[in-house]
Image (spheres, rainbow, N blue to C red):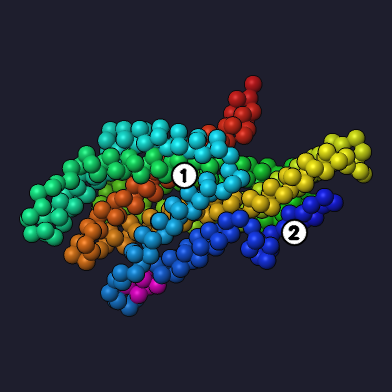
């Protein structure tokens, strides 16, 4: 907790419960914990106890995907979100949908593979089996590919604000002013956590590299199942790194409010006594920081849950027998792989653009 003469920024459970979007953050954290525990128990039981594969873990993973997407949507519904930010997310989502269509159908197979033909065949086989051949409707690969493109556009629009927020907090966390070291909470972050925060911004890009057949699976001669497991593992690693980075990035956001107070105070003509206007500016900034703290934490945690849920869904549904589910397991596994891949892609793109906007001098130095 940090206190000034005009306002305070505090981060304790009792006060956070009254902040906007705390319930959404609490749900994401709880679901993420339950999903991790359930997946770990499933893996241990199947490896050492030779137990049958349960149906709860894949169902919970699919439910977690919905929870994560809902949380990202809720961040735009907050009253503090500017209308232009919502409009920009819709615009980016539309443009990303067009780009995703080209990626799904025309991206070289050496870079990424979307098995929409396999998914279409499995859906048609399931329809024929369920209806006894009475249904003549057939799903084409084009329909599945366009659906995957819609997933990409939706993810791009939802991840935009979260990626920009994380980059802004990351920039302050890694480049904290020297004069703020004495009171900023980010300065006391352990070195191992600082390493994980930095790693969390590199892992999604590394995951895209691992997902490219020409980079890993083909040179190493991995089977399709092994390549899928490797991709799923890197999605999970990215998720765990992001989950671990939630607290440091949120703390950096809190520090930004105090740094604003300090900069205004030091820039004032009378450092011992702030003017009424300066007090109003600082008070508004710190009040806004208090209001947004749960939203900022949610914008960091929701993408992590989305990647984790997609990773576990890929793993569990990929190993599931086709007769064990009404919906072909390949449909869910490939859909989750598509969502996670586009999350990494558009997260990296949005983060890169945000980094250039925040620090143009670092990229366009004379």
Left or right: 224 as drawn, with respect to 96:
left
Sequence order check, earlier mark of 1 and 2? 2
Left or right: 115 as drawn, with respect to 293:
left
State which quarter of the image contains the C terminus: top right
Residue 1: image tag:
2
Q: Is residue 59 above or below residue 366?
A: below
Q: CA distance from mark 1 to mark 2?
A: 31 Å
- At a point 53% along the width and 33% down the height, the residue shown is 353
Q: Residues within 10 Å of mark 1 (few under 14, many from 20)?
A: many
Q: Position of residue 225 (x, y in %)?
A: 27, 55
Give SS at disc 2: loop
Q: Position of residue 272 (x, y in %)?
A: 92, 44
For mark 1, what is the residue?
A: 158
Is residue 246 among what the camera can see? no
- Of circles 1 and 2, the one toward us is 1
Residue nearest the viewer, comparing 272 with 230 = 272
Residue 348: image tag:
none
- At a point 35% along the width and 75% down the height, the residue shown is 45
Left or right: 100 as drawn, with respect to 366:
left
Residue stretch in magenta: 41-46
């Amino acid at each position: 907790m940090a206190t000034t003469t005009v306002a305070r920024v505090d981060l304790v459970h009792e006060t956070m419960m009254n902040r906007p979007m705390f319930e959404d953050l609490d749900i994401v954290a709880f679901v993420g914990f339950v999903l991790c525990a359930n997946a770990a128990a499933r893996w241990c039981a199947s490896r050492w106890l030779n137990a049958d594969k349960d149906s709860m873990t894949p169902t919970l993973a699919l439910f977690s995907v919905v929870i994560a997407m809902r949380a990202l949507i809720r961040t735009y519904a907050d009253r503090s979100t500017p209308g232009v930010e919502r409009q920009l997310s819709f615009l980016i989502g539309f443009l990303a949908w067009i780009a995703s269509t080209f990626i799904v159908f025309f991206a070289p197979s050496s870079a990424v593979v979307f098995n929409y033909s396999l998914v279409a065949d499995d859906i048609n086989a399931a329809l024929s089996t369920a209806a006894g051949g009475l249904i003549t409707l057939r799903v084409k690969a084009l329909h599945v590919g366009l659906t995957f493109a819609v997933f990409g556009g939706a993810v791009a629009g939802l991840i935009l604000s979260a990626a920009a927020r994380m980059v802004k907090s990351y920039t302050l966390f890694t480049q904290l002013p020297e004069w703020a070291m004495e009171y900023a909470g980010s300065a006391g972050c352990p070195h191992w956590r600082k390493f994980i925060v930095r790693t969390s911004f590199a892992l999604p890009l590394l995951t895209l590299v691992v997902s490219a057949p020409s980079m890993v699976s083909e040179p190493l001669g991995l089977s399709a199942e092994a390549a899928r497991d490797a991709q799923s593992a890197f999605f999970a690693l990215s998720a765990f790194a992001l989950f671990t980075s939630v607290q440091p990035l949120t703390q950096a956001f809190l520090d930004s409010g105090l740094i604003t107070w300090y900069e205004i105070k030091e820039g004032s003509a009378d450092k011992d006594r702030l003017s009424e206007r300066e007090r109003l500016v600082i008070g508004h900034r710190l009040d806004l920081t208090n209001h947004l703290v749960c939203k900022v934490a949610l914008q960091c945690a929701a993408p992590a849950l989305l990647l984790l849920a997609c990773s576990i869904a890929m793993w569990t549904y990929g190993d599931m027998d086709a007769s064990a589910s009404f919906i072909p397991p390949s449909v869910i596994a490939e859909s989750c792989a598509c969502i996670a891949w586009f999350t990494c892609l558009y997260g990296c793109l949005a983060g890169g653009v945000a980094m250039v906007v925040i620090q143009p001098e670092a990229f366009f130095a004379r």
